[in-house]
Image (spheres, grey):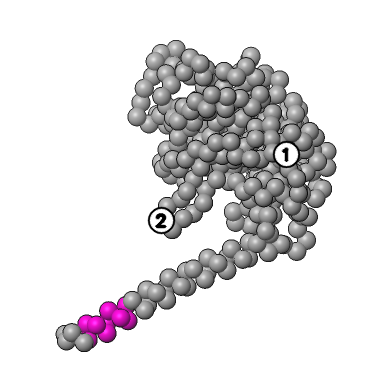
């Protein structure tokens, strides 16, 4: 092959690659533009003042297509169908309590994702930022606002995957002391110290004493509800087949998802009485892959995929005593937090 022919082949290849690159960029831009267009008949969303001390509001991440997609937004708790006030702060996961918010962000970059956890004050100003080791999954703040926790995937894409790995962190917002990996804590399984290479934690929920927390421990193909102590750096197993726990406001019950079949990515939502360990199945019969939120002592909320819309979720609520039936709370939304 002559040098001239080699040069011609090389130039042709470069031009083809450049064309493919431009095509990908234009396609991505087109998809982004489509998401930024308000959907006909969709909810009213407008920019405005959002503060984490606005009593009587329900905060959530707006999933309605348009310029405020993924914005932290609020609606009146008593009228969730009202127009949404969008803050301009964008998150993939969010939670707040007592004027402290945790916003998990995931920003795709050219070579890698720039994932971080933002600790927000009542006016949504960033107090501290922490890098995340993976894709945001769960976020919680203690009732006092003094502790925050988050879980990320560092391997696998979901809790239903054949293999997944998580990393869960707990932060004291008073001292800014960070426990970057809950796996550093001592594990007591059935009363004995336990260690294994496949240990994973996820889904922290806090009690009101700024020390006690509950979470999921996954190991040996099983999941456990664990009760932990931040000060003692220990976790103790309570019962099995509990994932993504959420402690009730009165501190007596845990809402959680329970696998319908071992190894299957199908979950039913239950409430566990912590004193008797009695389980109550809730009236939601769809598979709930979410960490539920208590709206009050009688009602829990959770996200379900929007029917016919890939990547979108709606917020639903259901009575916590197993009665009644699910009702659509906020379409196109996720990560609820009563303020």
Which residue is depicted at the point 61% across and 30% down? Answer: 141
Residue assigned mark 1: 51
Of all residues shown, which one is farthest toward the top?
191
Q: Quadrant of residue 181?
A: top left
Residue assigned mark 2: 111
Residue 21 covered by magenta stretch: no
Q: Position of residue 132 (x, y in %)?
A: 47, 40
In front of the other: 205 or 178: 178
Q: Quadrant of the C terminus?
A: top right
**Quick one: SS at disc 2?**
loop
Q: Which residues are magenta?
A: 5-13
Which residue is depicted at the point 82% across and 48% down? Answer: 82
In front of the other: 149 or 201: 149
Question: Seen in the image, is 141 located left or right of residue 185?
Answer: right
Q: Quadrant of residue 295?
A: top right
Q: Position of residue 308 (x, y in %)?
A: 65, 57
Q: Where residue 153 is drawn, which disc sits there? A: none
Question: Seen in the image, is 185 located left or right of residue 309?
Answer: left
Secondary structure predominantly adopted by residues drawn in magenta: helix
Which residue is depicted at the point 49% across and 25% down? Answer: 177
Residue 6 covered by magenta stretch: yes
Give whichever of discs 2 and 1 has the lower sequence position. Answer: 1
Tell me, yes or no, whether the two marked residues, 2 and 1, touch with CB atoms within 8 Å: no
Q: Quadrant of residue 16?
A: bottom left
Residue 292 in sight: no
Q: Residues within 10 Å of mark 2 (few under 14, many from 20)?
A: few
Which residue is depicted at the point 64% across and 14% down? Answer: 275
Q: Residues within 10 Å of mark 1 (few under 14, many from 20)?
A: many
């Amino acid at each position: 092959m002559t040098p001239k022919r080699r040069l011609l082949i090389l130039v042709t290849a470069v031009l083809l690659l450049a064309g493919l690159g431009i095509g990908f960029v234009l396609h991505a831009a087109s998809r982004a533009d489509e998401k930024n267009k308000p959907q006909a008949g969709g909810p009213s969303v407008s920019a405005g003042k959002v503060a984490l001390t606005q009593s009587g509001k329900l905060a959530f991440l707006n999933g309605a297509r348009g310029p405020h997609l993924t914005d932290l937004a609020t609606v009146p708790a008593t009228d969730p169908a009202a127009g949404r006030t969008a803050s301009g702060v964008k998150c993939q996961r969010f939670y707040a309590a007592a004027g402290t918010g945790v916003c998990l962000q995931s920003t795709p970059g050219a070579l890698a994702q720039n994932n971080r956890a933002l600790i927000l004050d009542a006016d949504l100003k960033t107090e501290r930022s922490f890098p995340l080791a993976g894709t945001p999954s769960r976020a919680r703040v203690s009732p006092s606002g003094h502790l925050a926790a988050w879980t990320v995937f560092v391997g696998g894409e979901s809790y239903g995957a054949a293999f997944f790995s998580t990393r869960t962190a707990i932060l004291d917002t008073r001292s800014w002391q960070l426990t970057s990996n809950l796996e550093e804590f001592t594990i007591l399984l059935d009363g004995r110290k336990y260690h294994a290479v496949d240990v994973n934690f996820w889904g922290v929920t806090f009690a009101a004493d700024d020390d006690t927390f509950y979470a999921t421990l996954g190991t040996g193909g099983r999941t456990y509800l664990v009760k932990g102590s931040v000060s003692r750096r220990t976790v103790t197993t309570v019962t099995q087949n509990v994932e993504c726990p959420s402690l009730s406001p009165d501190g007596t019950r845990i809402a959680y998802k329970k696998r319908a079949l071992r190894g299957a990515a199908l979950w039913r939502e239950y409430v566990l009485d912590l004193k008797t360990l009695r389980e109550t199945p809730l009236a939601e019969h769809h598979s709930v892959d979410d960490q539920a939120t208590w709206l009050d002592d009688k009602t829990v909320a959770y996200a379900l995929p929007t029917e016919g819309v890939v990547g979108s979720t709606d917020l639903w609520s259901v009575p916590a005593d197993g009665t009644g039936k699910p009702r659509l709370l906020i379409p196109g939304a996720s990560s609820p937090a009563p303020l």
